[in-house]
Amino acid sequence: MEFKEIFEEWDVYARKKQLLDRDFNKLSVINNANKKIIAITGIRRCGKSSLLMLFERELIAGKEKVAYINMEDSRISGKEGILDEVLKWFGDDGFLLLDEITAIRGWEGWLARVHEQLKGKLKLIVTSSRTSMIHPSKPLRGRILHFELFPLSFKEYLSFKNIVIDGTIVNQGKLENTLNEYIRYGGFPEVALANEEIDKIRYLESYFKDIIGLDIAEVTGDNINVVEMFARYAIESSYFSASKCLNFFKTLGYKIGKEKLLKLESYSSASYLFFFVKIFSYNIKNKSQYPRKVYNGDTGFYYSSTGKKDLGIQFENLIFIELRRRQKLNEEICYWKNKDGTEVDFVIKTGSSITKIIQASYDVQQDDVKKREIKGALASSNEFHIKTALIITKDLNAIEHVDGIEIQFIPIIKWLLSS
């Protein structure tokens, strides 16, 4: 089979495949492609390939010249000069959508060269799950613009499950049941569409192992058993510090250095397997010395890996992922703790200032839990001179004024469905 036939085969497949739409700013991507190489990044199996195919349909509707090719195809991935063959076939103008481009040797140099020579004519939109896309080499710096895709939001999850919001009591019960399923199994599209629990768990375990093997161990060159041990440790840890992780490995008889653990932290973050959230502090030394809070790239990993049904842990993890999805370019998500040990789950830093205070509390209806969450909200509000704080709850919807601070309690479903 000639290369041309392979390219055309993928393009026809992309145009015909049945797809569910995603809530993604496609127009922003298309407009920015006139000036930059667009890279769609995100955790493996979150839907990047499908999103690229949805881009194609959007562009076809706009009468644009466009083609899609999956570069992981074994018939082309190892071929020398295959990207130039793509260019010969497609031409030097229009939108070229290259899925998993990092499977091709020399992809960075090719992208840099073609972008420089054909800027404004050929628009390149590419995807990859690999960490090399997150940290490109020098030739691509300044030329590439990243757009992140995450697993399904709750809105998207409801759409995938064909659940319409109509405000009835019956519908509210359906939303609550769906939310519990969403928290437990996460938002991967294939998992959302699976009917049986055993299939959902099987998919999640497969994704977890693929990320460990292909996106971390293969890139770092580390033993896959070491990487998996690191991941299993992180998935059950609320906080992460290299020193404590080092002690964990020592108790199991592993000889491993602190630098390697920090490298694994970095690469597991770049692959979106875990997010490591730093404490907020004006003191740089404090930020580096305090442990990071650990969140999974999808809430389903916790249940599939541990078998535990801990709604409190997954509830907070879900809120973090949604905050990360909504995060603006000038924002940073941190946690906060004062000298007394009073803590706030999330503080949003805009520039050098804290602008939002957010607590995650599944069981806030319990008096002791409510007092603890309010105590943290008040302490941080006074610290940062903010007059409002948000506490996201399972079902409490209320506003209380305490010591001049407005405490807003909002149910998780209402918050997730807000814009």
Image: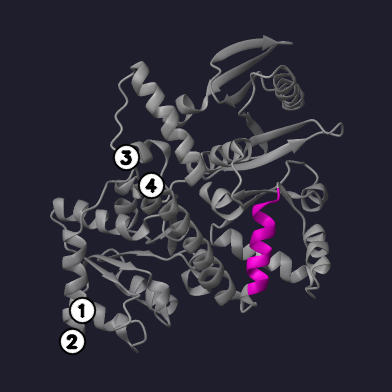
Q: Are marks 1 and 2 in contact (CB under 8 Å)?
A: yes
Q: Amino acid at mark 2?
A: Glu
- Which residue was labeled with disc 1? 6
Say whether disc 1 or disc 4 marks the residue closer to the N-terminus.
1
Mark 1 Cα-neighbour bin, 10 Å: few <14, some 14–19, many ≥20:
some
Q: Amino acid at mark 4?
A: Ala
Closest to the observer, 86 or 396:
396
- Under circle 3, the secondary element is loop
- Image disc number at residue 2: 2
Q: Is residue 1 above or below residue 32?
A: below
**Region of the chain picked out in magenta, as a range:** 225-237
Residue lying at 81% horizontally and 73% vertically, measured from the top left: 253
- Which residue was labeled with disc 3? 161
Numbered disc in front, either 1 or 4? 4
Q: Amino acid at mark 1?
A: Ile
Q: Amino acid at mark 3?
A: Lys
- Left or right? Give the position of 211 relative to 45: right
Q: Residue 257 colored magenta?
A: no
Where does the C terminus fall, quadrant-wise? top left
Mark 2 Cα-neighbour bin, 10 Å: few <14, some 14–19, many ≥20:
few
